Image (tube, rainbow, N blue to C red):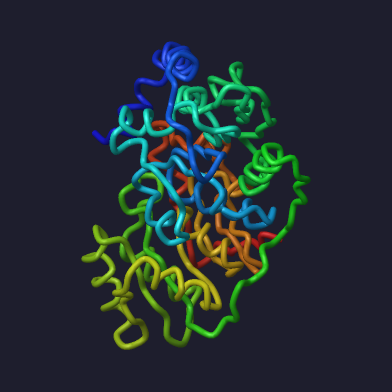
Amino acid sequence: MSSGSLLKRLDRLGWWPAAWVGRLLAVLLWPAPLTGSTTLVIRPGGMGDLVLLTLAFRELGISMDQVTWLIEKRSEVWARYLGLNYHCYDSSPIQVLFKILGRFDLVLNTEQFFGLSQAFALAARKKGGRVVCFSTNRGARFADEKVRYDAFEERESDAFGHLVAAGFSKPWISKKWTERTQGATGVPVVAVAGLQAESRQFDLKFWKTLVLKTCSQGKFILSGSPQDTLFVRDLAKEFEDRCEIFSGSFSDLCAQIAISPKLITVDGGMVHIASYFGVPSNVIFTAGRASKWAPLGKGSAVMVRTDLKCQPCTLFGQVPPCDFHFECKKLDLNSEVFISNG
């Protein structure tokens, strides 16, 4: 079990005493003076959250160099890509705690639910400083300012935008789309994803049909995580010389997505990378909330079941056990259509 998973299990009972310990540590101990950034941003969770959070900073015109970032290890590829000054709290929580202790004028706790994040926020706040967090965080009662959070319908990009704007006293203006950062000079990218999550796991036949539906002709690039290598190779065999298997670094993949005319994938981190670059995406949604996590590139579209009372069921990023064998995954790609995210 990862450190992040263990902390989530401990959160229900552990956040309250941890929050009080965090407050006491910041008051009783005298940390060394901090040079550089005076703002700490806490962002637990997967890479997609961090991508949209950094998008909010960019849209608000706030330099990401002026803050310190506290993230999970699974998101650090994006932090490295942007050159952020970051720490991974789940690599060594105690060591990280003493690195941030009582040193920040502003702490933005961007965690939507779990309260242990608030313990880090309170410990990091300098005397006279501010902690700003979402109203739905378990530890929100200890914050200096709470920002309303809608866990059901509001786009996550807007939620992060409102929070960052509150911290820096700036207005947030919602945009329907993000502008492309580069021209569409490449080929479509098909990003195989979701194979490790039961709610988003599709077989080879599904992926083949999806590619034929969205890339009916011409070449495309096929990518996947290292653990999906064998699946990607098998899928590539179905298209002979039409596709190229991506083999570069994460930075190379980001560069390829940035110039692609479109991305084809399932709900996940790759969707939000495309959104960051303003690239349109065709995205399959299952248990996830399309209204919150839909792609932001102009011309994007989603495919999702709309006839199920139980869908969407994901809340605060957590997918509950399913009594219906993930009926939301049963999509007939020959008859279902992509719905414009307009």
Relative height, residue 49 to residue 239 (above, below):
above
Q: Quadrant of the C terminus?
A: bottom right
Relative height, residue 14 to residue 287 (above, below):
above
Task: Name the spot of residue 1 as percent of width and height, x first.
Answer: 24, 33
Quadrant assignment, res 280:
bottom right
From the viewer's perspective, tell me whether residue 53 is left or right of residue 2. Answer: right
Q: Residue at x 36, y 36 (%)?
A: 89
Task: Name the spot of residue 153 as percent of width and height, x first.
Answer: 66, 40
Q: Residue furthest left?
A: 230
Q: Residue at x 41, y 21 (%)?
A: 11
The foreground one among 213 and 259 is 259
Q: Residue at x 33, y 69 (%)?
A: 249
The foreground one among 169 and 183 is 169
The foreground one among 87 and 250 is 87
From the viewer's perspective, tell me whether residue 245 is left or right of residue 165. Answer: left
Quadrant assignment, res 58:
bottom right
The foreground one among 82 and 147 is 82
Relative height, residue 112 to residue 214 (above, below):
above
Relative height, residue 102 to residue 161 (above, below):
above
Task: Name the spot of residue 228 as percent of width and height, x first.
Answer: 27, 61
Task: Name the spot of residue 17 as percent of width and height, x first.
Answer: 42, 11
